[in-house]
Amino acid sequence: MTIECSRRVNRVTPSATLSISTLAKELRADGADVIDLSVGEPDFPTPAPIVEAGKTAMDAGHTGYTATTGVPELRRAIADKLAEDGLGHDPDEIIVTPGAKQALYETIQTLVDDGDEVTLLDPAWVSYEAMVKLAGGTLSRVDLSPFGFGLADGGLDALAAAISDETEVLIVNSPSNPSGIVYGVEALEGVRDLAVEHDVTVISDEIYERITYGDSPPSLGSLDGMADRTVTVNGFSKAYSMTGWRLGYLAGPSSVIEQASKLHSHSVSCATNFVQRAGIVALEDVDEPIDEMVRAFERRRDLLVDRLRDAGVELPRTPEGAFYLMVPVVGDDQQTCENALADQHVATVPGSAFGTPGYARISYATDVARIETAVDRLLKTDFFER
């Protein structure tokens, strides 16, 4: 007997980033010296004060269920953090989730009905498409590769041509995974004007907002006219190097939070109790480790960009945030990345996974020596378009 699975699950494919990472781990298990530039995970330990806070919370018995939307102390700390960003959300307008990915999933499930149009800015993180399809939505995709992956120099015009009164939701991710682009004030104001004109709800994915290498732009929901139409998603995985802790949140209008909390209560129940207690310490007492990590990422970015440009690789844009670089590759990007992994034991992610074929995403969340070796290996092959 073959069990027939649901149509909504059959609409989606496995995460390309996790698939590549799995193949890399299998090669490594066979003894290969694999350099994994595919994974979106900081290679820094979780800061000690956060770890100690988690241990203390467990010792204190914080191992049971919490309120569905999160412990009050953490929601207050998040509200205070958002207030510093110009977002006026009360604690009861916040849901604490097991990771920002869960926050995105719950938000999309709450906002998107069958047939609703959702607009993505390509290259876009791989799971947006899958989440929209699981909700029954349709996709309108805006190719930003001709504009250096940004919204300047024609990018906003391309978005304006794609968005309409039929658009229900626009997803904006800045700093961007996979491009590392940071949308400036002018770009965000352009997004705001289009959202207001067409009465579009915006999901602002700000998971990388602490990892920037220049001026930090405002949070999208803080702009005039956006407070009532923006759901802000963030978390602790990237900035605090807490990927395995699984802690994130969404903040938005009370009407959205009320409905999303129902989905939350019937799925994950609540985020882990002692992890939430550690999250309070992360928000209130940890800054220097983040600054050190960001400085290290910036040095790696500069090294990677300089090496590639010296080798004749024409990069569309220097990343301004996150820890990713999109590079043009030769031929079919899926096959090129697979060949690089099989032949040179360097794992990258094909750009087609992000809606932008002809490119590959490189993560520089690894140490300088490994980045140097990976570039040496790839430059021996026909990997980069030059």
Image (cartoon, rainbow, N blue to C red):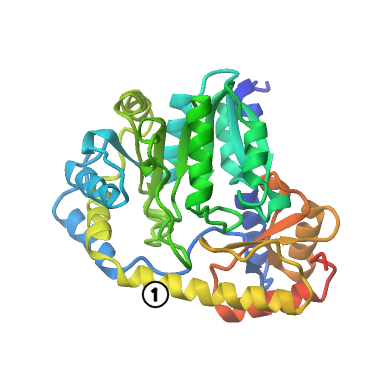
User: Which residue is at the front of the view, 333 or 11?
Assistant: 333
Tell me where residue 346 appears, x and y as whole percent: 70, 67
Please name the amino acid that badge 1 sits on.
Answer: Glu
| Residue at the image position 36 percent from the left and 34 percent from the top | 268
- According to the picture, the residue beneath numbered tag 1 turns out to be 292
Which of the 4 image quadrants contains residue 381? bottom right
- Residue 281 can be seen in this image: yes
Above-or-below relation of 89 to 218: above
Tell me where residue 104 appears, x and y as whole percent: 46, 38
Q: State the SS at label 1.
A: helix
Above-or-below relation of 273 to 163: below
Which of the 4 image quadrants contains residue 320? bottom right
Q: Which residue reaches farthest left?
A: 60
Report the number of discs.
1
Above-or-below relation of 326 to 189: below
Tell me where residue 4 appears, x and y as whole percent: 65, 20
Q: State the quadrant of the N terminus.
A: top right
In the image, taking residue 375 as reference, residue 294 lies left or right, namely left
- Residue 14 can be seen in this image: no
In the image, taking residue 238 as reference, residue 166 lies left or right, namely right
Tell me where residue 25 appears, x and y as whole percent: 62, 61
